[in-house]
Image (cartoon, grey):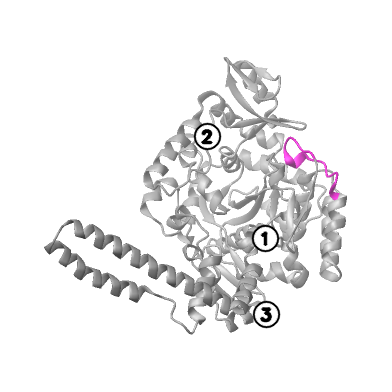
Amino acid sequence: MPKDCISFKETGYFSKLICDYLDEDSSLKDLYNRYPNIENFKGQIKEKKESYKKETRAVLVEALKSQYNLVDTSSKTLENIELLSKGTTFTITTGHQLNLFTGPLYFLYKIISTINLSEQLKETHPEYDFVPIYWMASEDHDFEEINYFNLNGKKLRWNRNASGAVGELDLKGLEAVSDLFSQELGLGANADKLRALFKNAYLKHDNLAKATLYLANELFSQYGLVIIDANKKSLKRLFIPFVKEDLINETAFKTVNETNKILENISDDYKIQVNPREINLFYITNNLRERIVFLDHKYSVLNTEISWTKEALLEEVDNYPERFSPNVILRPLYQEVILPNLCYIGGGGELAYWFQLKQNFEANKIPFPILLLRNSVLIKTKQQADKLQKLTVSNEDLFLKRDAFINKKVRQISNIDIDFSNQISHLKDQFKVLYKLAEKTDQSFIGAVAAQERKQIKGLEYLEKRLLTAQKRKLKDHVVRITELQSELFPNQSLQERNINFSQLYLEHGDQLISVLKDELEPLKKDFNLILL
């Protein structure tokens, strides 16, 4: 399939921090371990191999086998789970919330990036095995972030009251969403597949974690993807020492705050994504996920009557590790403790908060993974590509914000020169003569000259703006065509991948959608992809 690309910086949609990282800006080197190029994985393998325990592997494999016990999956996925018991097997991991029906389109790009990098590493290091992992964020509790997806410009929302970890939520109310989804899909073989996929995932399982596991497995098991729900007692037991470290010594609070100061000193344009708390843990039980705090000389769970002395809390951790849930600061550490992981693949916002965590990893003596920005894609149909060509709209034009896009195209196609910069430059030259004259007479005259210069330049800028507006009206049909086309590709004037659900493209392309993306995406290539499908 035809593919083009544009740099992440040129898109205008990625932060300065991420663009600087992609450019390997030297000021950021202390915030990550190894840069994501194929050569650096050799050192990462060695470091992880030396630190990851055989006993941890055994617990991980047993937890995965138990999780997949009732899941109909591929032989390749089952083989990958078995491979994880070997000391020569490592993981490449991405994580994602349990968004309804996968949520935004980039869910696919994250997982395909993970699968493709695992395969590329196997080619480079045939003596090792590499397993792609999708980490389900089953312990999150922000239901409003995950309870909808967008299809054909409509928001399909799951309306219900929710509390506690989202993975444990029952699936009441999704029958109504299924009916609406079914109506929106219309007729056809691909529509029927999507209809069945939604029903089998959400109407035949008893909680959101199991439904998401089924869904991701159906989409990607043929590629050997291993999905993990880490909200399990056996896995949490591996994390007990790190839970105690956070409770007693507030290590994450101290180290992340130190890193935040470093980030702020590097650039005012770097935004702090997450702020650590003295305790970065939640307490979770049925329908409850609330912060643990230290107040009035005791440990308590906010908005409850639950509290402990220090000794009682540590005993609770030992006896019920599954009740302690890491927040955004500690979740990455938990991931790297229980997985033989080499690389984390995420979006720009995710990598931005990972950059805040390296000091905490070092303090806990856990190797910091390679951080890789996931693939990003704009998918165009042939019809859209043909229209863009006829309207002489380039890839770079498409990524412009709406007003800048319209103004640029109107200037290009107008038979009138709407650029008054030459006139303004000529005017400034004329005023230079007046300034010299003013200097030879009364100094107070200089202010009058300057005021008149500003007035006349503003007048020219106003006339240019009026002329541009007049040409927009004259070229209204052309403006409508280009803006409609941009709106198709950038819904809500944002990136396609952040808005639409995969089902919108699957309706037309079916299974070809994932197979084409699998063939085209190159995880270590530092460009935003434009793919004709």
- In terms of depth relative to the viewer, which is nearer, 399 or 354? 399
Of the numbered discs in the image, which one, if any, rests on residue 133? none
Label 3: few (<14), some or many (≥20) within 10 Å?
few
Corner quadrant of residue 494: bottom right
Query: Would you say residue 330 is visible in this rendering?
Result: yes
Relative to 419, 215 lies left or right: right
Q: How many tags in the picture?
A: 3
- Of callouts 1 and 2, which one flags the residue occurring earlier in the amino acid sequence? 1
Residue at the location (58% across, 21% down)? 294
Judge whether residue 396 can be spotted in this image: no
Q: Which residue is mark 3?
A: 383
Q: Quadrant of the C terminus?
A: bottom right
Disc 1 marks which residue? 105
Q: Which residues are magenta?
A: 161-174
| Secondary structure at numbered mark 2 | loop
Earlier in the chain: of badge 1 and badge 3, it is 1
Q: What secondary structure is the stretch in magenta mostly built from?
A: loop
Q: Nearer the viewer, residue 438 or 193?
A: 438
Residue 119 position within the rendered picture, expressed as x and y whole percent measured from the top left: 60, 63
**Tag on residue 276?**
2
Q: Nearer the viewer, mark 2 or mark 3?
A: 3
Check disc 1 and give the amino acid type.
Leu
